[in-house]
Amino acid sequence: MNLTQAKADELVAQAKEAVRNDAFTWQYNQQQEELLIAVSDRDLHFLLTLKRNPFEIKAQLRTRDRHIPLVRLDNSAQHVNPDGTVLRGPHLHWYKEGLGVTWAEAIDWHHADQPMETILRFLDVIHARFPNGFQEALL
């Protein structure tokens, strides 16, 4: 799981899009995985994992070839960073060279009662889009 920080940052910064030919429907109480491809390098693939329920919204971007996590959205009540800093509430885990995704930063835009707004913000953070649309499943 060795990536340089520069390479990890470059991978996250890549514009990515889903390869599906239809709109993505975000299911309730299910974990879903989507293939994303870098716009500028069609040979560069990523996996996006999404999960939601009434209490949480989780998402993760990782490389497809080696399954290296790059960014993860988490809403656990507490997270302790390797330097001892304690975060309370929603946060983003970022790949850090030598640490993987053990490092996190607090965020103020994760709202379990607003799943679409939250996940669309995460997609912006990871520079990803669904060209044919993204919708919430009707319950």
Image (cartoon, rainbow, N blue to C red):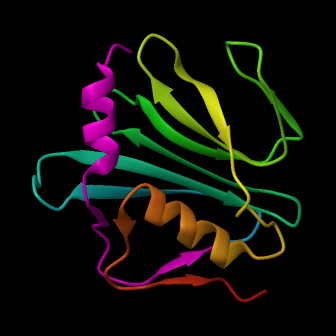
Q: Is residue 22 visible?
A: yes
Residue 36 is a magenta residue: no
Residue at image coords 25%, 52%: 14
Seen in the image, is 72 located left or right of residue 6?
right
| Residue range of the region highlighted in magenta in the rendering | 1-26
Q: Position of residue 139 (x, y in %)?
A: 79, 86
Q: Position of residue 88 (x, y in %)?
A: 86, 39
Compared to residue 92, the image places residue 22 above or below, namely below
Place residue 79 in its image quadrant. top right
Compared to residue 117, the image places residue 76 above or below, namely above
Report the number of numbered marks. Answer: 0
Q: Is residue 30 visible?
A: no
Seen in the image, is 135 located left or right of residue 39?
right
Compared to residue 63, the image places residue 30 above or below, namely below
Seen in the image, is 94 located left or right of residue 111?
left
Which is more toward the observer, 84 or 44? 84
Place residue 109 in its image quadrant. bottom right
Q: Position of residue 81 (x, y in %)?
A: 70, 21
Which is more toward the observer, 6 or 26? 6
